[in-house]
Amino acid sequence: MSAPPFAEPTIETRGKQHLAVVRETVALADIPALYDRAFPLIFAALGRAGLEPVAPPMGISHGMPTETLDLSVAVPVAERFTDDGEVTGETRPAGRAATMLVRGAYDRIAPAYEHLFDWVAAQGLVPTGTAWEQYLTEPSPDGDPQQNETLLGADLVD
């Protein structure tokens, strides 16, 4: 049984977003290990700061991937985050983004990004070089990966 086709992307205007992040340049094969290490660090730092997440966790790619990726593992927060060890604050500027909801296992993410960027080019839009994914559902070891929902985005030049 093949995966269902991807949803039609849409254009959204997004507000400024404060984040608590662990940012590293990693080999593509090491991305899962970065997430596994970063989220506990971020949530511990948020606890020390008395802050709660205001939206689901994210991964933000800065630039196009090669053998490595400049990646921010991020949790949105209501106010600017003060650095705490490896966890630093980033603020994403307001702007337009092409977005697309992806349902299914995480192995669909790479082809979904290809679909999203092909759509962006077909619309004559210009990406900024920042792409992101927001994990709307939390995967569990005994859960069905086909139930995952991930919102993909590509920030656009205004």
Image (tube, helix red, strand yellow):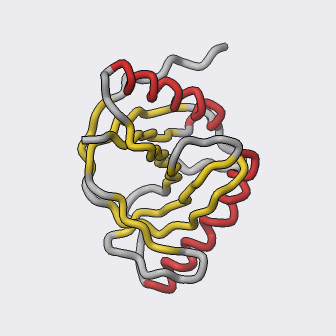
Badge count:
0
Q: Position of residue 14 (x, y in %)?
A: 27, 49
- For the C terminus, the image quarter is top left
The structure residue drawn at horizontal position 37% and vertical position 43%, both measured from the top left corner, is: 155
Which of the pair 54/112 is nearer the observer?
112
Asked whether, in this view, residue 156 is left or right of residue 84, the answer is left
**Residue 85: x percent and y percent?**
59, 82
Q: Residue furthest right?
A: 29
Q: What residue is at 28 percent from the left and 34 percent from the top?
A: 11
Q: Residue at x 37, y 22 (%)?
A: 8
Q: Residue at x 60, y 32 (%)?
A: 110
Instruction: Indicate the position of residue 71 as horizontal and vertical percent values.
Output: 57, 55
Quadrant of the drawing holding the N terminus:
top right
In the rendered image, the vertical position of residue 20 relative to residue 92, given as above or below: below
| Residue placed furthest toward the top | 1
Q: Does residue 24 appear left or right of residue 152 in this picture?
A: right
In which quadrant of the rendered view does residue 96 lie? Answer: top left
**Nearer the observer, 24 or 99:** 24
- Dividing the picture into quadrants, the one containing residue 36 is bottom right
Between residue 97 and residue 135, name the one nearer to us.
97
Q: x, y percentage for residue 146?
A: 60, 32
In the picture shown, does residue 148 fall above or below 52?
A: above
